[in-house]
Image: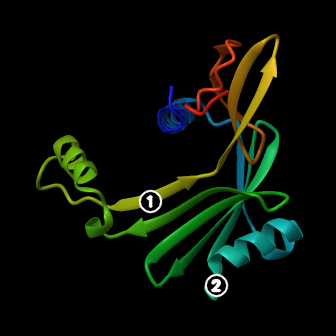
Amino acid sequence: MTRSKQFAIAVAAVVAATSMAIVQAQNQPKQDQERRVKEAEVPAAALSALKKLAGANALAEIEEETENGQKTYEAEWRSGTGHMEAAVTESGDLIELEESVASDAIPKAAIAAAQKAAGDKTPLRWVKKTFVVYEVQFKKDNRHHEVLYNAGGQSSGCDDEDADDGDDGDDDED
């Protein structure tokens, strides 16, 4: 399998896992905690990361969220392009970035699919979401593994195992 195919499969797995996590989170009763906080209550590393992302723009609101025992900090601000949000870990690692975008910046296929789902005359509001994930590759029990993790250490559950046949999957000579 070529590296580009492996990359496409990994991206599709991340999108699927993220979508499933969002749907699952929306269907679960609220057990996690969420509260609005002041800048003074945010760990220095998290606040520094949020301010760096916001640039010259003032942070409008900061929330502390606790999910599965892990705290994250989400901030909102307005930029020249519109509404922005970012979520970071306590140590300042980026988890997610959201930005409002105009429909002319959206791929035509996405617009067509959304209009089909919502109806042609329904107004659409677009938000571009960027999730940060890290892929780790390792060999265990004579098998190759690839697992995706976010900055909080949560796994997407994706594990691509291949038998150790000497092929590293990159179309180069092994």
Label disc, if present, on residue 128 of the rendered structure: 1
Q: How crowded is mark 2: few (under 14 residues within 10 Å), some or many (20 or more)?
A: few
Q: In this view, does 130 lie above or below 27?
A: below
In the image, taking residue 91 as reference, residue 30 lies left or right, namely: left
- Label 2: which secondary element: loop
User: Residue at (57%, 66%) from the top-left corner?
Assistant: 85
Q: In this view, does 73 lie above or below 44?
A: above
- Most extreme residue toward the bottom is 56
Label disc, if present, on residue 53 of the rendered structure: none
Query: Which quarter of the picture shows residue 86?
Result: bottom right
Q: In which quarter of the image is the C terminus?
A: top right
User: Residue at (47%, 33%) from the top-left corner?
Assistant: 5
The x and y percentages for residue 99 are 48, 66
- Label 1: which secondary element: strand
The x and y percentages for residue 47 are 79, 71
- Most extreme residue toward the front is 173
User: Residue at (80%, 74%) from the top-left corner?
Assistant: 48
In the image, taking residue 128 as reference, residue 164 lies left or right, namely: right
Q: In the rendered image, is residue 77 in sight? A: yes
* Badge 2 amino acid: Ala
The x and y percentages for residue 53 are 66, 74
Residue toward you, 124 or 105: 105
Quote the CA–CA distance across marks 1 and 2: 20 Å
Residue toward you, 27 or 11: 11
Q: Mark 2 points at which residue?
A: 58
